[in-house]
Amino acid sequence: MKEVLVNIHVEPLPEGGFLATSDDVPGLVAQGRTVAETLEIAQDVALGLIESYLEHGDELPPALRDIPAARGDVRIPVTLP
């Protein structure tokens, strides 16, 4: 099993909180109160979608087929006091 980095787009919602989507994993939609919470939910949703593809014998989305193992620069959310 390898760990990969999935591209996630996070945007603030007008009513508060954040929304995450991904072009790498179609159907991934996650919403949370903070960026960190939203990313945590997005990670769970991505894993669930990938497991569903595999369980049903569906082909993985193109962005996930030959993706290299996790490596590179990643930005993380940090709350400023």
Image (spheres, rainbow, N blue to C red):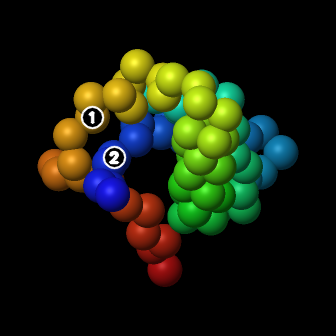
Dot 2 and dot 1 residues touching (CB under 8 Å): yes
Q: Is residue 4 visible to us here?
A: yes
Image height of 36 relative to 7, above or below: below
- In this view, the residue in front, 77 or 41, is 41
- Residue 15, percent from left and from top: 83, 45
Give the image quarter of residue 65: top left
- In this view, the residue in front, 56 or 61, is 56
**With 10 as the anchor, is 77 left or right in this view?**
left
Q: Residues within 10 Å of mark 1 (few under 14, many from 20)?
A: few
Question: Which residue in the rendered view is the most extreme toward the top?
Answer: 62
- Residue 44, percent from left and from top: 61, 57
Image height of 59 relative to 48, above or below: above
What residue sits right under mark 2 in the picture? Answer: 5
What residue sits right under mark 1 in the picture? Answer: 67
Q: Earlier in the sequence, mark 2 or mark 1?
A: 2
- Residue 31, percent from left and from top: 73, 49
**With 22 as the anchor, is 14 left or right in this view?**
right
Instruction: Measure the alpha-carbon separation of dots 2 and 1.
Output: 8 Å
- In this view, the residue in front, 3 or 43, is 3
Tell me the kind of residue under disc 1. Ile
